Structure formats: structure tokens, C-alpha cells
Amino acid sequence: MYILKGLYVITDKKLIPRDRFIETVEKVIRGGAKIIQLREKDTPEEEIIRLGKELLKITRKYGIPLIINDSPKLAVEVGADGVHLGKDDPGIIEARRLLGSEVIIGVSCYGEIERGLRVEREGADYLAFGTPFFTPTKPDRKPTPLEVLKEAKRKIKTIPIFAIGGITKENAQSVLETGVDGIAVITAVFSSPNPEEAARSLAEFFKK
């Protein structure tokens, strides 16, 4: 059983050179990532499956979970530890039927606490709320106030909550003071010239 907390790192093919994809993600894990999500938009399924299986070798080596974005079907094909679902993806009940009881299901809640409460009841294993800050990954997304994260933690008692969106080492402390269990990042790590050190600087917040 994996512990779902700490630094959650999400891949971005625009920021990671394809020829160094696996080694770059491994560096981030060495830096302290506790969860890896393979997020591939507009990539052929065969390529996602290939990448996923390669990444799975690395995440298993370090004993952390690999999550596939959007697709329960691809999570099955990869043999991944979990799937992360947004509003336009299959629902939890359908995903659970396909994946079984042991696979991790995470759900994006944006700034919607009622959505979080509903998917908690439906059997989600963790939730992601965001974005607390502007992020180039979701440039049109209106920031979610930190107070919403605090309220989510007060109301959602049984599963971990991650904050996602525009989090950096400069603002991570303010996010963690809301009580969330972890932070999810993309740009803060993969836009750095040294992703391992960037991950390490964020992972340090969870050692305090």
C-alpha cells in the first residue's frame, strides 16, 4: 500500500526531451518525488503505453506509484498503480469496475468542494484541488483561493488532498499551511535546468 502524500510530480512532454525522458524522471524521483503521473496530451496510445511501461520499471525500483492521466484503459495496458481523472474522463464507478479495488484513483476537483465530497463518497483515493496560482499548464484557469484548500481539508476527512497549479519553492510554504497532504508540480521541476535539485528543494518542505 502506497502512502499518498508529499511531492507529486507530473510529466510534460513539452518540458522533457524525449531522448532523456526516463532518465529525467528518475532524477526527479531521486530528488524526492513520492508519486509520478504520466501526463501525455495528444500522444498516440502506443507511445503512452511504451513510455508508461518504461517508467513503471523506474517507479517500482524506487517503490513509488505511477499514475496515468485521464485513461483507465491505458492504466490497465501499462499495468500502472493508478489513474487520475478529470471532469471529461470516465467516472470513478466505471474506472473502479475496470481497474479493481487495489488501483489508486485520483480526481481533479478544481476549486469545487462539493465535487470533492461526492467523489470521496464514490471511492476516490485522493483529490487534487487547484490552481492556487497562475500556471502555464492551465493558463485560462482562474486561481483557486488558498481558503478553499483549507475548507476542503476541514470537510474532506478520509482521503488525501493535493494542491496543484503554479506551486514553486517560493510559495510552497503558504500552500502547505492550508493543511494539504501534498503538492503536485510540473513546471517548477521540469522547467529547471536541474530537475533533481528542483525536486529536492520542494521535497524539503515535507521534512520540516
Image (spheres, rainbow, N blue to C red):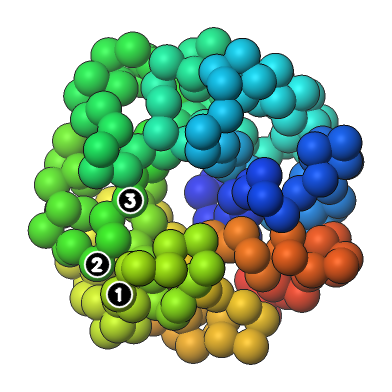
Q: Amino acid at mark 2?
A: Gly
- The answer to whether marks 1 and 2 mark residues whose Cβ atoms lie closer than 8 Å is yes
Specify whether 166 is left or right of 180.
right
- Quadrant of the image occupied by residue 161: bottom left
Q: Is residue 165 above or below residue 36?
A: below
Relative image position of residue 180 (x, y in whole percent) = 42, 69
Q: Is residue 69 above or below residue 112?
A: above
Q: Which residue is mark 2?
A: 111
Q: Is residue 102 above or below residue 131?
A: above
- The answer to whether marks 3 and 1 mark residues whose Cβ atoms lie closer than 8 Å is no
Assign a secondary structure to mark 3. Answer: strand
User: Mark 3, mark 1: which one is toward the viewer?
Assistant: 1
Look at 43% across and 68% down and name the residue there: 139
Assign a secondary structure to mark 2. Answer: loop
Q: Amino acid at mark 3?
A: Ser
**Mark 1 or mark 2, earlier in chain:** 2
Q: Which residue is mark 3?
A: 108
Specify whether 159 is left or right of 69.
left
Relative image position of residue 138 (x, y in whole percent) = 43, 63
- Quadrant of the image occupied by residue 71: top left
Q: Which mark is residue 142?
A: 1
Q: Which mark is residue 78?
A: none
Q: Amino acid at mark 1?
A: Lys
Assign a secondary structure to mark 1. Answer: loop
